[in-house]
Image: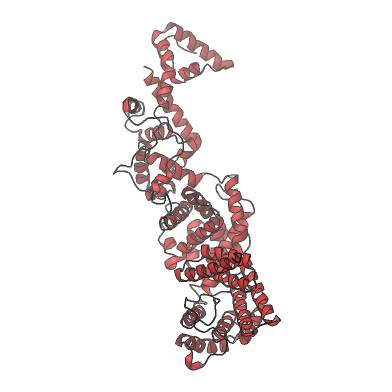
């Protein structure tokens, strides 16, 4: 069978046997994924100079090859396509590791999580009567949600909060694998729950 | 057909609240709903307050600057979640946390965006620009690290994977990455291992010998830092030779008997000759490699060192200048392949100074200082740079 016809898990297995054709296919399939993850993560650190991006991408491949390809050997395929998410994670971590261990620059000692805080300006206030009002509202909406979704509606409640509280788009929610919903499916849930919640809030 | 006592549904409230213009059957249904609202106090009131429920939902938005709590997971969890790498139960648990946590929700959203959004035009352009210069440098860098002169090229990548819509840069990216991975794979495992071990050992010994008895200002590939001990090129006595050099030569000779045309072994032989000041023999050997085609940056670097030694040995006059120029030419060719190689930059900066090309010498020194990581080489380079900058200042 040609390498480009192999499943992801079979391809990785072939790579681990040092099959050159398999490695060619490996880079054909996954280099784009790795490169974009490197770029986006480096951009969060504020440095996307060409030489650096080149080095970082090389670092990712070196990490993959280190210790007799331990990263690939130890990877367990939950689904055949999970290799994509895995390589994105490996690439992202490689870039974070680089910047954490670089010579200190202003802002380099911030927690990595802070790099991922949204840049959108908030409309909510944290303290004072506005915060109290919001907390009251949150409790009110939570109660209504339970009424309209029931004890088995954990998934729908999560979707609701992701959409209204965290401002996820329907596309972003659909990326959450365990939901097993398409974008249309997410939109349908949001529409149904929203109408039900607004109906109750209007009583 | 609507029943007379049928109250407004959520969809009807929504549609009436938006006052959309509808037509046909939908408009007929809404008209019946309006008529009911007009006669039903409860529905009329509900219709009046319905817009405020929308405003309430808007106020649910998370605020920025929320603080991390002890129960908040680390970034690793969100990367795993977004990558689909967690069991379903854990995905559900952590997503539930993110949905109601104003600190973690934005993080998960940003990670999902990083992992899932298609590349923008700007990103495609950035990555395309990245690969135009990288291929040669990466090949040379990896070739140096593995003692391999050239890599085989591979066919371009096919298009079309998930959100991938990359144009031409994808082909060169994949080809170059194949070279990197193949070099790492093939030369760690498999039939090349034994040869690679020999070459690696020789390389290490030559590097040590260079540092122990550095006989030239210039740097040989992977030479360990050492102060200059012998300023005049010339054949060195066997008895004064560093042990590492003797050992390296002891390995090179029998290896070359088995593989007389092996470019890696030939290059190591040339470097051993350079360490003895036998620049003539070194040039002859390096020319054999040149004639094999596709010279690598390190071969050109060695030729630069050899002609520099020849120039230094030539006293003064036109021959000296010509040898410096030849050395400079080879190093310039090497820098086209490996523009950020600190050893080659170091070497060319010195020769530029000898040729009174002070501006370029300063440029090379500045680039060298950006590329080099060894503090001893940095210190030496900094002193050279100061010297060149001093020459540029007008006489007092």
Q: Quadrant of residue A70?
A: bottom left
Q: Residue furthest front?
A: B396
Q: Does residue A6 lie above or below B227 as drawn?
A: above
In the image, taking residue B14 as reference, residue B173 lies left or right, namely right
Count of numbered circles on the image:
0
Where is residue B310, by image quadrant? bottom right
Residue A90 in the image, given as x and y percentages of width and height: 44, 56
Left or right of B48? Residue B142 is: right
Q: Residue furthest top?
A: B39
Identity of the residue drawn at 39% across and 46% down: A113
Instruction: Give x and y (percent) for residue A141.
Output: 35, 26
Task: Name the colouring of the figure.
Answer: secondary structure
Residue B294 in sight here: no
- Residue in the foreground of this view, choosing between B268 and B27: B268
Image location (x, y in percent) of residue A183: 50, 37
Q: Quadrant of the C terminus of chain B?
A: bottom right
Residue ID at (43%, 58%): A103
In the rendered image, residue A28, in percent from the top left (x then y), is placed at: 57, 58
Q: Residue furthest right?
A: B318
Asked whether, in this view, residue B89 is left or right of residue B328, the answer is left
- Would residue B334 be seen by someone viewing this image from the given angle? yes
């Amino acid at each position: 069978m040609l390498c480009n016809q192999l499943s992801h898990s079979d391809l990785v297995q072939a790579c681990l046997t040092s099959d050159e054709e398999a490695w060619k296919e490996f880079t054909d399939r996954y280099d784009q994924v790795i490169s974009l993850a490197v770029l986006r993560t480096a951009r969060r650190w504020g440095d996307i100079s060409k030489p650096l991006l080149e080095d970082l991408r090389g670092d990712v491949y070196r990490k993959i090859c280190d210790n007799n390809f331990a990263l690939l050997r130890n990877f367990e395929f939950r689904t055949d396509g999970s290799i994509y998410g895995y390589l994105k994670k490996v690439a992202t971590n490689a870039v974070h590791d680089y910047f954490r261990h670089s010579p200190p620059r202003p802002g380099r000692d911030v927690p990595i999580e802070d790099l991922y805080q949204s840049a959108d300006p908030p409309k909510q206030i944290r303290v004072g009567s506005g915060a109290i009002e919001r907390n009251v509202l949150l409790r009110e909406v939570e109660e209504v949600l339970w009424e309209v979704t029931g004890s088995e509606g954990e998934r729908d409640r999560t979707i609701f909060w992701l959409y209204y509280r965290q401002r996820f788009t329907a596309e972003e929610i659909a990326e959450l694998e365990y939901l097993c919903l398409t974008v249309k499916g997410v939109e349908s849930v949001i529409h149904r729950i929203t109408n039900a919640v607004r109906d109750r809030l209007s009583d | 057909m609507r029943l007379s006592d049928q109250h407004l549904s959520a969809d009807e409230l929504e549609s009436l609240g938006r006052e959309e213009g509808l037509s046909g059957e939908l408009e007929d249904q809404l008209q019946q709903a309006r008529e009911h609202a007009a006669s039903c106090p409860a529905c009329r009131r509900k219709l009046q307050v319905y817009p405020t429920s929308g405003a309430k939902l808007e106020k649910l938005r998370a605020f920025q600057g929320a603080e991390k709590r002890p129960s908040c997971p680390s970034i690793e969890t969100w990367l795993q979640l977004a990558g689909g790498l967690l069991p379903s139960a854990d995905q559900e648990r952590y997503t539930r946390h993110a949905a109601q946590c104003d600190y973690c929700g934005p993080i998960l959203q940003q990670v999902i965006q990083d992992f899932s959004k298609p590349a923008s035009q700007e990103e495609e352009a950035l990555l395309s620009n990245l690969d135009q210069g990288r291929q040669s440098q990466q090949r040379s860098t990896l070739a140096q690290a593995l003692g391999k002169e050239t890599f085989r090229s591979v066919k371009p990548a096919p298009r079309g994977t998930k959100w991938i819509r990359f144009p031409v840069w994808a082909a060169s990216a994949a080809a170059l990455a194949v070279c990197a991975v193949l070099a790492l794979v093939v030369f760690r495992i498999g039939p090349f291992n034994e040869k690679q071990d020999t070459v690696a050992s020789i390389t290490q010994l030559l590097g040590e010998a260079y540092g122990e008895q550095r006989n030239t200002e210039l740097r040989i590939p992977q030479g360990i830092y050492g102060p200059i001990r012998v300023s005049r090129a010339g054949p060195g006595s066997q008895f004064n030779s560093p042990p590492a050099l003797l050992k390296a030569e002891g390995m090179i000779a029998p290896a070359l008997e088995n593989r007389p045309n092996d470019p890696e072994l030939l290059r190591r032989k040339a470097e051993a000759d350079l360490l003895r000041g036998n620049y003539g023999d070194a040039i002859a050997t390096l020319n054999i490699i040149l004639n094999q085609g596709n010279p690598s940056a390190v071969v050109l670097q060695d030729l630069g060192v050899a002609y520099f030694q020849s120039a230094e040995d030539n006293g003064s006059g036109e021959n000296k200048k010509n040898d410096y120029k030849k050395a400079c030419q080879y190093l310039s060719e090497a820098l086209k392949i490996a523009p950020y190689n600190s050893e080659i930059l170091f070497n060319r900066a010195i020769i530029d100074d000898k040729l009174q090309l002070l501006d370029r010498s300063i440029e090379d020194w500045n680039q060298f200082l950006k590329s080099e990581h060894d503090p001893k080489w940095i210190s030496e380079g900094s002193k050279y740079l100061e010297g060149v900058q001093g020459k540029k200042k007008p006489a007092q």
